[in-house]
Image: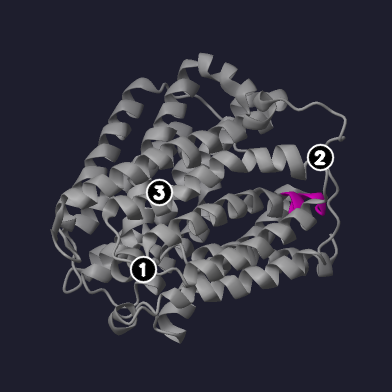
Amino acid sequence: MKTTTQVQLSLMMFLEFFIWGGWFVTLGIYLPNTLKTTGGETAMAYSTQSWGAIIAPFIIGLIADRFFNAERILGILHLIGAFLMYQMANATDFRIFYPYVLSYMIAYMPTLALVNSVSFNQMNDPAKQFSFVRVFGTIGWIVAGLVISYAFHWDSEAGVAGGMLKNTFLMTSVASLALGVFSFTLPKTPPKVSRDQKISISDILGLDALKLLKDRNFLFFFLASILICIPLAFYYQHAGQFLGEIGVSNPAAKMTIGQASEVIFMLLLPFFFKKFGFKKTLLVGMLAWTLRYLLFAYGNSGELAFMLIIGIALHGICYDFFFVSGQIYTDSKAGEKFKSAAQGLITLATYGLGMLIGFYVAGKITDANLISEGQHDWNHIWIFPAIFAAVVLLLFAIFFKNEKIEYKK
């Protein structure tokens, strides 16, 4: 791969995740404080990610893979996203805001697969080259949080009170416009499937991989993946709101510690996987979810603020040790014939079904623990996902039989 191509792909990844991190993290602070949403309405907004994940395969399978170059679809979707983000910034109540955020996530979620397609198409050794490109996505997410907190102070107490977080949507709109235009300069990635070739709904959704559920171990892993997304949704939906509400300074910047730890533990994962095996790796990941929420439940913005920082820093173990390990396990179980279908099925089950349930449950639990306007009983809120994750861990430990899985470099 040429150096110029690597730079292009790295910039693409940087902007792709700068865009996501530039508004998604602070949405939980913005909605209740500026648009005065309930926990249920906040859950509806975050659930658009799941609806986007469910619809994305159809956009990729029916359009991108058959009729147009991936980089052109990527550009068009981000130009549409720039317009929708601008509209979100100017929405004055949730009824106006919701259709725009739903439309945006339907447009954005397919781009996550498209940037991977554009990248892999230019690589002669993806196993070695992709990580050096993808890491710029994590850097983009981190930079977005630092810009919000330290460059503009939009998430400060005064900034939130003044409605300054609406500027995150304007910033994202500009970045989306830039990526939309830039995408048309990316290396060509032509359609993978002939226009005349028939594609079934089963192919698009990866339903052929349902055969894997006959394997008892894979079935328990599949169910655990869906269930662990319920506590995961609590973090995505309410962690930023929680930090802002209890008076933690620069919550967007603090949240980037989670992305930094994700990079570190991604590098450590192969060694841990090889030494301890798949089952123990997943169990550590689930244990980290329980520990994180207990730290959130009993930490505070004063003397115990370090507990909150540790809880955020555990994100690398929570995500990498469960979800990335799960992708490796799925790949090894599927075999050559069902690899793509199996990964598609797991994505649909987790980011689609699992997160959809999780966002709904998190919203209901949060509303049930409302003390007064803008104040919640966070101790009770965080105890629920802590116990839930512990139960999933216990069931997985009992019913999943350990098996040797090779880590493929």
Distance CA(mark 2)–CA(mark 1): 39 Å
Above or below 253: residue 406: above
Main secondary-structure element of the magenta-colored stretch:
helix
Query: Mark 1 — residue?
Result: 30
Task: Bin the neighbour count of mark 1 within 10 Å (Cα to Cα): few under 14, some 14-19, many 20 and up.
Answer: many
Using residue 203 as the reference point, say whether residue 389 is left or right of it: left
Above or below 256: residue 46: above
The numbered dot on residue 318 is 3
* Mark 3 or mark 2: whose residue is earlier in sequence: 2
Using residue 102 as the reference point, say whether residue 363 is left or right of it: left
Amino acid type, residue under disc 1 in the picture: Tyr
Query: Mark 2 — residue?
Result: 66
Distance CA(mark 3)–CA(mark 2): 36 Å
Amino acid type, residue under disc 3 in the picture: Cys
Q: Nearer the viewer, mark 3 or mark 2?
A: 2
Distance CA(mark 3)–CA(mark 1): 25 Å
Magenta residues?
117-123
* Mark 3 or mark 1: whose residue is earlier in sequence: 1
Residue 128 position in % (x across, y down): 72, 52
Residue 191 position in % (x across, y down): 83, 44
Q: Is residue 121 magenta?
A: yes
